[in-house]
Structures are given as C-alpha cells and as structure tokens.
Image (cartoon, rainbow, N blue to C red):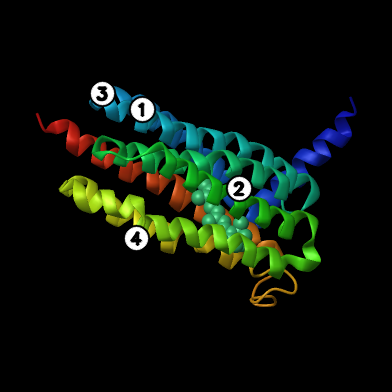
Amino acid sequence: MNYTLLADQVRNNDLIINSDPVAITFFIGYMAMLASSVFFFAERSSVDGKWKLSLLVSALITGIAAVHYYYMRDFYLETGTSPTAFRYIDWTLTVPLMCVEFYLLTKPFGAKGSTLTKLIAASVLMLVAGYLGEGVYKGDNVMWGWISTIGYAYIVYEVFAGDVAKLTKSSNSPSLGSAMFLMKIFITLGWSIYPIGYMIQEGNLLAGTFDPKAIDLFYNLADAINKIGFGLVVYSVAVAESGKK
Ligand SMILES: *C/C=C(C)/C=C/C=C(C)/C=C/C1=C(C)CCCC1(C)C
C-alpha cells in the first residue's frame, strides 16, 4: 500500500469536506439517516403490535439510505461527480418501501394489495425513466423527465383521489386523516424537490439557474425531508394510536 498517496487522499478529502457544500450534505445525510434508522428501530418497543412493522419499515428506509450515502459520499469525494447509479439503486429500494408504508397505514381500514401493486408499478416507471434521462440518455433528459412525471402524477392521483384517498375518507379515523394530510404534503411539496433538481441538468427547463453539480444538494435535502420526516409522521401516528386503549 502506498501510504504517501493514502495520506494525500485523506488530506484532499478533508479539504473537500470542509469547503464543498455538496460533500458536506453527503456527510450530514449519512449521519442523519444512520441515527434515524437506529431511532425508529429502537422505538418499536414503545408502540403497539401493528405499528411495530411500520416503524421497522421506516428504519429500513433510512437504514438502506444510510448505506447508500456512505458509498455516495466516497464516490463524490473520489470523482467530484454525481453518484447517479447509487442514487437510483437507493431510490429503487426505498420508494417502493414508502409505498408499503402507505399501504400499512391504510390496511387496518381495508386497503387492497392491488393498490400497493399499482403504487409500486408507478414508482418503478418514475425511477427507471429518471435513471435513463440522468444516467444513460442524458441528451434526451427532457423526454425521459416527462415519462417519469407520468409515474409521479399517478402516485399523486392515488393519494388525492384514488383508492388511498377513498379509504382515508371512509375510515372516519382522525389519526389516519391527519397522517394522510401530512402524507399529501410530503408527496406534493417534498417529492417535487426531486424533479426540480433534475431540471437543472444541461438542456432542461431550469438549466443555468444552478451549477449542475448542485443536483445532489437538491436530492440530499429532499431525501432528508422525505425519508426522515416521513418516518417521523408514521412514528407520531403510531405513538398517538398506541396510547389509546
Ligand atoms: C427516498 C427517495 C424518494 C422519496 C425519491 C423520490 C423521487 C422522485 C419523486 C423523483 C421524481 C422524478 C421526476 C418526477 C421527474 C424527473 C426524474 C425524477 C426521477 C427525479
């Protein structure tokens, strides 16, 4: 092993970590995901039966993200470029798990497995098209962005007017109602940060407004809001419902 080279690299990474906001958010993202995962996992013991699974899924979402952030941070420090493949592998695992989370919330009120299948299919379309536009056919990123948006729009539709919305209405459960109200905010405002970041790519609608490198600032911010924030909403519903006997 060449220790001089290694020492140079450590010094170099240290400099980047101290001065590059993208690198800093990868580092903070890693720690925050890891801490959240431990928190959600540990808190399983303070909620009732069916909520334990919801907290476990929240812990898995942030745990999977923590592992990816560890690698994404290294990749970014080594290459100075966006870790697109790691990013989309992370999302392909965690977004379907977020759909499972919706399903678990509505399941006590009669949610069907077919709704879960539809949500997962829509998220796969959204992510595959996004990856093609960002990682493979960069020249056509606008077209792939629109195809991806079809999947996103379908998820928004399900939550606002489709099966998920109907169940929430018919459940007459105030705690499910308020959880779903917050979920709608995450899906419309929180999730919209991703396509905004995507649009700063060369040739897309917001090109030139930010350095294209800032794409990871958008994604890291959005991940923190949506993965940790979303988990906290599930946690607060679980605690509120567990208190009732
Ligand atoms: C934990 C990760 C989450 C919640 C990721 C969500 C990702 C999106 C909502 C991405 C959406 C995109 C579009 C709607 C169009 C452009 C391409 C994407 C993939 C950035």
Which amino acid does the dot numbered 4 rest on? Answer: Ala
- Of circles 4 and 1, the one toward us is 4
Q: Position of residue 208 (x, y in %)?
A: 69, 77
Which quadrant of the structure image shows residue 184?
Answer: bottom left
Label 2: state its secondary structure.
helix
Name the residue tied to disc 4: 161
Name the residue tied to disc 2: 26
Q: Position of residue 30 (x, y in %)?
A: 56, 40
- Of circles 3 and 4, the one toward us is 4
Which amino acid does the dot numbered 2 rest on? Answer: Phe
Q: Residues within 10 Å of mark 3 (few under 14, many from 20)?
A: few
Q: CA distance from mark 1 to mark 2?
A: 28 Å
Q: Is residue 118 above or below residue 202?
A: above
Label 4: state its secondary structure.
loop
Label 3: state its secondary structure.
helix
165 and 199: which one is in front? 165
- Which residue lies at the image location 48% right of the left edge and 47% below the top edge? 118
Name the residue tied to disc 3: 49
Which quadrant of the structure image shows residue 70?
Answer: top right
92 and 166: which one is in front? 166
Q: Residues within 10 Å of mark 4 (few under 14, many from 20)?
A: few
Name the residue tied to disc 1: 53
Which amino acid does the dot numbered 3 rest on? Answer: Gly
Q: Is residue 244 above or below residue 26?
A: above
Any part of residue 217 in sight? no
Disc 3: residue Cβ within 8 A of ligand 1's nearest atom: no
